[in-house]
Structure formats: C-alpha cells, structure tokens
Amino acid sequence: MIEAIIIDDEKKAITALKFDLETYCPDVRVKAVFIKASGALEFLQSHTTQVIFLDIDMPVMNGFDFVRELKQPIRSQIIFVSAYSEFAVRAFKVNAVDYLLKPVDPGELQDAVKKVIDRGSVPPDYHSLLKNIMDYPVAESPKGKLALPVNNGHHLVDPAHIIYCKAAGAYTQIILDNEKSFLISRNLGRTQELMPAGLFERVHQSYLVNLNHIKKFRKGESPEAIMINDDVIRVSRSNKDRLAQLLGIQ
C-alpha cells in the first residue's frame, strides 16, 4: 500500500482526486489532505509519506515554494497537479516527478502511480531535478512585453497599456487602454508577480492598478482611485496611505 498526502487550496479538487485514487488506484491510501501548504510542512516534520500530490497555484505558499521548504534530502516522490499547462509540461516529464493537468485523466493518474511503484525509492539526484524544474522559464516574450496565459495560448501585452487588473476567482481580468479587456488563467496574486516592479500596486484584494493610469485619488473614509477610463477602483483602508505616498499626496 502506498501512502500519500494531497495539497490543494481547492476542496473540490481534493475531493475529486481522492475519488479518482480510490476508484482507479486502490493501492494508494490518502493519509491526509491540506488546503494550506504550510500545514503539510508541519505534518511532514513528524510523519512520512511516499507520495505528495501537490497543486502548484496556491496563495501564500505555492507548490514551488513548498518544495523549496521541504527538509532535505526529499524522501517523498512528488506528483504535481495543476490546471495550468503553461508551466511547461516537458519540464516536469523527468524521471523524478510527474505532472498531471486538471481535470486529472484517470489513465495518466494510473501511469503516475505506476511510476512510483516501479521506482520504489527516490533517486539521489532528485533535488537537482526539482531545481531544474523550478528554474525553468514559464514563457518568453519579446522585450518590453508580457506573455499573459489565456485559454488558447499567450496574449502579448505592453504593460504600459494595462490600466488595472481585477480578480475573477482563479482568473484575472486585464483592462487595457488600447483594446478590449480579457481574462488570463492566473489569479490576481500570480498576475502581480508578472507585472513590472514599481509600476503596479495592489490597492485592494481584488485590484492591481497601474499607477500611471490613476487620474484622481479620494482618500476619505471610503478611499477610491479613479482611472483614466473613469472606472472607480476601491482602495482598502490599509493600503490608502501607501498609495497616497506613491502618488506624492500628503
């Protein structure tokens, strides 16, 4: 019997993966599940597991951050699970780990588990292989442009034309001054990581704004930023002083 844990910030994804394992991989027993990677790190300080099913796109600590924090040498075999194909599947198809796209295909899940069974123990260069994966570039784009992942590829955008970004669940809406808005397959936190430092500011849990596209700022009890397209963006009270400072407002 193979013991495993599942780490995913979406409860529905955990439930679905547990069902698939019980149905298609009866040799796997799920010891524990975690919606926060930090909880799994704490668990692994006093417990062992042969396999970790690990989501990549998670708030606070993503899958790559989790791997970096694991005690070395890494004894568990890791199977990455993600809804995002832009993480370069070929970078994950190495001898040490596997990569499954959501929704998980039962056949691919069985193949991944079979690899664990056939391998038996983790090879000595496991950490090196993981480092290569984590350092692999997600996407390259022409100088000065961002490659933003959409359903059918990447949308190349000059960040100077982005007015603001709005959270839309697991997606982010990109509002521009020169074309129609569109959704990208990243949450707002991961979208912020793509943006040039110093140009964009997270003013609210739902909004990331281009400072150059703010035309008016109301700092009162209900702070707001008025953008060049006249959209009104809520600013959280905890962020209003910092935004005022960045805008040169006393």
Image (cartoon, grey):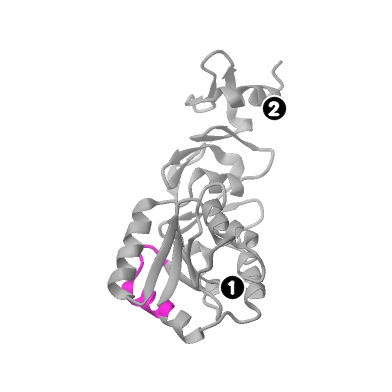
Location of residue 168 in the rendering, given as x and y in whole percent from the top left corner: 42, 41
Q: Can you say whether 29 is above or below 153 in the image?
A: below
Location of residue 50 in the rendering, given as x and y in whole percent from the top left corner: 50, 73
The answer to which of 40 and 207 lies nearer the viewer is 40
User: Does the magenta portion include 179?
Assistant: no
Amino acid type, mark 1? Arg
Q: Can you say whether 96 is above or below 153 in the image?
A: below
Mark drawn on residue 246: 2
Q: Is residue 156 visible?
A: no
Q: Can you say whether 47 is above or below 176 in the image?
A: below
Count all numbered tags in the image, as a single digit. 2
Amino acid type, mark 2? Leu
Residue density around tag 1, few if under 14, some if 14–19, many if 20 or more, within 10 Å: some
Q: Is residue 143 visible?
A: yes
Residue extending furthest toward the top: 220
User: Does the magenta portion include 109?
Assistant: yes
Residue behind mark 1? 75
The answer to which of 215 and 9 lies nearer the viewer is 9
Q: Residue at x 51, y 84 (%)?
A: 120
Q: Nearer the viewer, mark 1 or mark 2?
A: 1
The answer to which of 176 and 25 lies nearer the viewer is 25
Q: Residue at x 33, y 58 (%)?
A: 15
Q: Which residues are magenta?
A: 101-113
**Quarter placement of the C terminus:** top right
